[in-house]
Image (cartoon, rainbow, N blue to C red):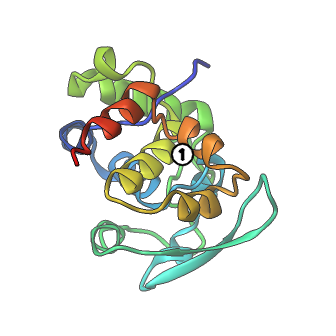
């Protein structure tokens, strides 16, 4: 799969939400809201989220526990979930209680980006785009880079900036904002 970038503009995030429905919309909203790797997002079960203000997850890659707080938007989306507590949130339509695959998530997101008319603008989009969008949006809203480093478990600010797609021209623009 190709390298993916964050979705930088709020209008593009809204365009994605507009074309997605049900399970797929929830995957997008939760992915951008939680900043989890797609493998961790896909393993969530309805009972992990229903009626809760937060939940804990053991991240697969780091094997570390992480607390995720649910925003009002996410709670609203979760309230629409049907199913038993032991069912996967992103259940496969192929039968049984199996989560969709990472490949299927990638297909869903790419098709949505195409339908939303943003694919040519932002390039390939996949599960990792959601995590990067989470970081980019928080950084753009003024969240300190050290907090993002802690969330992503990165060891340097440079790693986090590169990861969330902060490019040299954006850093140069920041310098132009200061007039003393």
Where residue 1 appears, as percent x and y from the top left, is 62, 19
- Furthest-right residue in view? 63
**Residue wearing tag 1:** 92
Is 159 above or below relative to 50? Answer: above
Q: Residue at x 72, y 61 (%)?
A: 59
Residue 86 point in image, percent of width and height: 60, 72
Q: Position of residue 147 (x, y in %)?
A: 55, 65
| Residue 113 in which image quadrant | top left
Which percent across, then down, holds residue 131?
A: 51, 47
Q: In the shown orientation, is residue 57 left or right of residue 52? A: right
Q: Of residues 176 and 164, which is closer to you in this image?
A: 176
Q: Residue at x 73, y 53 (%)?
A: 155
Residue 88 shows in the view:
no
Q: Is residue 151 left or right of residue 19?
A: right
Please name the residue shown 57% across and 35% down the image.
162
Q: Is residue 116 above or below residue 45?
A: above
Residue 58 in sight in this render: yes
| Residue that appears at 41% across and 53% down | 139
Q: Secondary structure at mark 1?
A: loop
């Amino acid at each position: 799969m190709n390298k993916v970038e964050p979705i930088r503009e709020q209008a593009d995030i809204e365009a994605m939400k507009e074309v997605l429905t049900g399970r797929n919309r929830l995957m997008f909203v939760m992915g951008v809201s939680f900043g989890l790797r797609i493998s961790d997002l896909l393993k969530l079960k309805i009972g992990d989220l229903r009626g809760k203000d937060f939940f804990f997850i053991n991240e697969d890659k780091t094997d570390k526990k992480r607390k995720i707080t649910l925003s009002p938007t996410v709670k609203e989306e979760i309230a629409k979930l049907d199913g038993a507590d032991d069912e996967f949130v992103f259940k496969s339509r192929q039968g049984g209680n199996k989560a969709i695959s990472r490949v299927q998530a990638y297909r869903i997101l790419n098709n949505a980006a195409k339908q939303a008319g943003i694919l040519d603008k932002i390039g390939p989009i996949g599960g990792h785009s959601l995590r990067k969008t989470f970081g980019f949006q928080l950084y753009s809203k003024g969240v300190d880079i050290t907090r993002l480093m802690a969330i992503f478990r990165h060891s340097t600010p440079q790693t986090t900036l590169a990861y969330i797609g902060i490019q040299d021209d954006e850093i140069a623009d920041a310098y132009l904002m200061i007039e003393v």
